[in-house]
Amino acid sequence: MSLEPFPVDTRQRPLASLRVSITDRCNLRCGYCMPEESYEWLPAKDILSFEEILRLTGLFADTGARRLRLTGGEPLLRKDATKLVAMICAANRFDEVAMTTNALGLATSAEALKAAGLTRLTVSLDSLHQDRVKQISGRDSLARVLAGLDAAADAGFTGTKLDTVAMAGFNDDELSDFLHFGAQRAIEVRFIEYMDVPGASKWTSGKVISRKEMLARIEAEVGVKPEPFGHQGSAPAARFRLPTGATWKSQDLSGQVFGIIASTTEPFCGSCDRSRITADGMWFRCLYAELGTNLLQELRSGVSDDQLRAKIRGTWQARTDNGAEQRLERKIRKAYEPKVPGVHLEMHTRGG
């Protein structure tokens, strides 16, 4: 294998972060992701095997990827997911191997995931109220999520992040409650602007709480202005810290760090170094992209590793994607609708 420089795309963005969906299935029905109760799941024969995932992740590591995130659907629904984690971590190709999960399966798997070598967890939770969790996800799951977070802490996971989609009229009154929750559990909360992503069939701009609005509301509630914290770089979240004097419900929140992902109102396409592989092996360089590269087909056609590396490199070097910026430029925005027949763009297929 030649030691070529790692590739950059047409906007000088490196191929540094890879997300791999290991299943399209999920046990929740969150309204912004997969709002229908029933779906036609991918057949087993079309899903990447563990060996194929291991091969692909190694090839992407050869081409510059340094951070790997396993996603879904819900990744813990994949049979023997912990075994896959162990296989990837044993190969020792990434600086970080993380997982995004709804935590419903963490109570029984956190210890094994930690032992397998998983670096970090990101947990999705959109409310601290039982009735709201059931409303948004279609399941009465809050107790299981909290049990999963407890199990993760007991297993030794640190640096856990909590992703919360902020929606006007639903959970926008819980911002400071989440900061308090994060402070109690040593968790960094990341608020996500409600995005007009595939599957968000009920998205409207009126439900979006912008980063500017979130910061103003938090400042009004905790009594001090959040301070920028660190350098965002290629990370999706801009981070902030509550200075001395921040309090909420008589609790001291001084020093609490949180993030805001402002893809809807302040896109960060210019620094995006992420791409994603779906459970059936389609490689997309943008969350909004309708056309991808069928790596499953390449793998099963007998293509060599050198040929695949060359394809990954050349495809990335030609990358021009700026889907979020294009969405922002539209005068009228609505839930994303694919123009290519048969293309599935729902978040649960892409591993947002």
Image (spheres, rainbow, N blue to C red):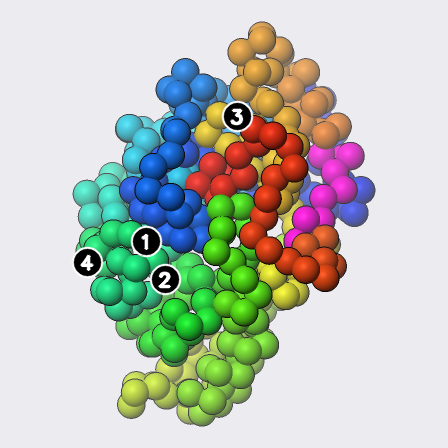
Above or below, comparing residue 52 to residue 174 in the picture: above
Dot 4: few (<14), some (14–19), or many (≥20) neighbours within 10 Å? Answer: few
Of the image marks 1 and 4, the number of the one nearer the N terminus: 1
- Decide which of 217, 307 is in the foreground and name it: 217
- Magenta stretch encompasses residue 280: no
Dot 3: few (<14), some (14–19), or many (≥20) neighbours within 10 Å? Answer: many
State if disc 4 and disc 3 touch (CB < 8 Å): no
The picture places residue 92, in percent across and down from the top left corner, at: 47, 33
The picture places residue 270, in percent across and down from the top left corner, at: 72, 54
Name the secondary structure under disc 1: helix
Residue 117 appears in the figure: no
**Residue at 76% across, 35% down:** 317
1 or 3: mark nearer the eye: 1
**Type of amino acid under label 3:** Gly
Above or below, comparing residue 268 to residue 250 in the picture: above
| Residue identified by numbered label 2 | 126
50 with respect to 346 (left or right): left
